[in-house]
Image: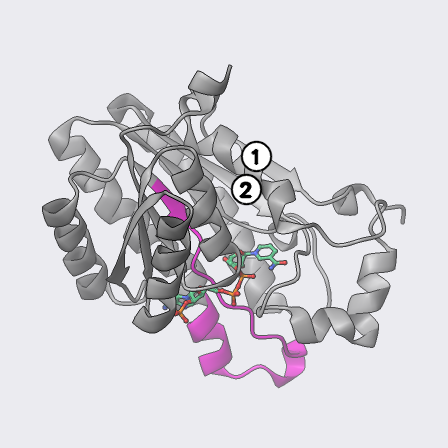
Amino acid sequence: MSEQFSLDGKIALVTGASGGLGRHFAGVLAGAGAKVCAAARRMDKVLQTVAEIEATGGQAFGVEMDVTDSGSVAAAFGLIEEQAGPVTVVVNNAGIAGGKPALELEEDDWGRVMDTNLKGAWTVAQQAAKRMVEAETGGVIVNIASVLGLGVSKGVMPYAVSKAGLIQMTKALALEWARHDIRVNALAPGYVETDLNREYLSGDHGQKQIKNIPQRRPANMTELDGPLLLLASGASSYMTGSIIAVDGGHLVSAL
Ligand SMILES: NC(=O)c1ccc[n+]([C@@H]2O[C@H](COP(=O)([O-])OP(=O)(O)OC[C@H]3O[C@@H](n4cnc5c(N)ncnc54)[C@H](OP(=O)(O)O)[C@@H]3O)[C@@H](O)[C@H]2O)c1
């Protein structure tokens, strides 16, 4: 069974790997045998991710990438190929939140979230897929969506819309790219404490949200490891266009 989940010999890219879930995911993929490319804008933090992985005996290297800039994404893929070879596992994790009541939102608030969470994920997925098609390697793309792409909450409208879009994009790309042996799936985590939401979760609204989760707590990062590895490895060889929620039952909480 463990062979099915192995990523031995794979080159795996994790975007937004300078902290939070991305740093954790990079370690999980390296632990499963992948050579991991950790990517983000803050190279000092990316290099910390690389050092953590190397300290545990894994293989990793870092590359600077701004997912909102297609030139930066293309350049990063070029560097990765030069250094390691073709990427066949992509975790599209880079994302930002930006919470405000909808009546107070400004054009920039909308644009920043969409550019990163939605357009950024597409830019990375398309760059990866073009290279997978050309090299005839096939591959897997795991989009990190959110329960907020499946349900709604107050004060996070652009974020929720971006994640709903990412979920629909996952299905659309899965449909188009199956013939190239590229599988595209999404993980939709519930709340996991990171820099993205630490302040929110400790506030009144966040505490109320946590009480509303049937399991009555946020996730530990390690509780995402199994679902992530499933989607990133051959263990999910007959899954594409699937969305896996990992949310302590949040999406089925009572009305
Ligand atoms: N934490 C949760 O409860 C939760 C729940 C559901 C889904 N998620 C999703 O999980 C993903 C990671 O979230 P997190 O909680 O780990 O957030 P985080 O701690 O704030 O980390 C976000 C990461 O995204 C990177 N990033 C942001 N803008 C970028 C850009 N333009 N180009 C490249 N990288 C960029 C940041 O790196 P740089 O600033 O160095 O570029 C950072 O590494 C996000 O997509 C988020 O929506 C999180």
Residue 167 colored in magenta in the image = no
Which class describes the residues within 10 Å of circle 1: few (<14), some (14-19), or many (20+)? some
Looking at the picture, tell me which residue is in the foreground, 12 or 110.
12
Q: Residue at x 64, y 79 (%)?
A: 100
Please tell me whether mark 1 or mark 2 is closer to you in this view.
1
**Residue 233 pos. (x, y %):** 42, 27
Location of residue 98 (image quadrant)? bottom right
Residue 110: x percent and y percent? Answer: 49, 74
Task: Give the answer, above or below, for where 236 lies relative to 253.
Answer: above
Is 111 situated left or right of 62 in this image?
right
Tell me the element at label 2. strand
Give the structural element (helix, strand or loop) at label 1: helix
Q: Are marks 1 and 2 in contact (CB under 8 Å)?
A: yes
What residue does disc 1 label? 227
Q: Residue at x 23, y 59 (%)?
A: 73
Q: Residues within 10 Å of mark 2 (few under 14, many from 20)?
A: many
Residue drawn where x is 56% and y is 39% of the image: 225
**Residue 244's image quarter?**
top right
| Snapshot quadrant of residue 156 | bottom right
Q: How far is the residue under mark 1 from the one under mark 2?
A: 7 Å
Q: Residue at x 69, y 51 (%)?
A: 151
The three-letter code of the residue at mark 2 reads Leu
Is 93 covered by the magenta stretch? Answer: yes
Comes first in the chain, label 1 or label 2: 2
Residue 238 visible, this orientation: no
The amino acid pointed to by label 1 is Pro
Stretch in magenta: 90-113
Label drawn at residue 187: 2
* Percent x, y of residue 108: 45, 81
> Which coloring applies here?
one colour
* Front in this rendered view, residue 170 or 91: 91
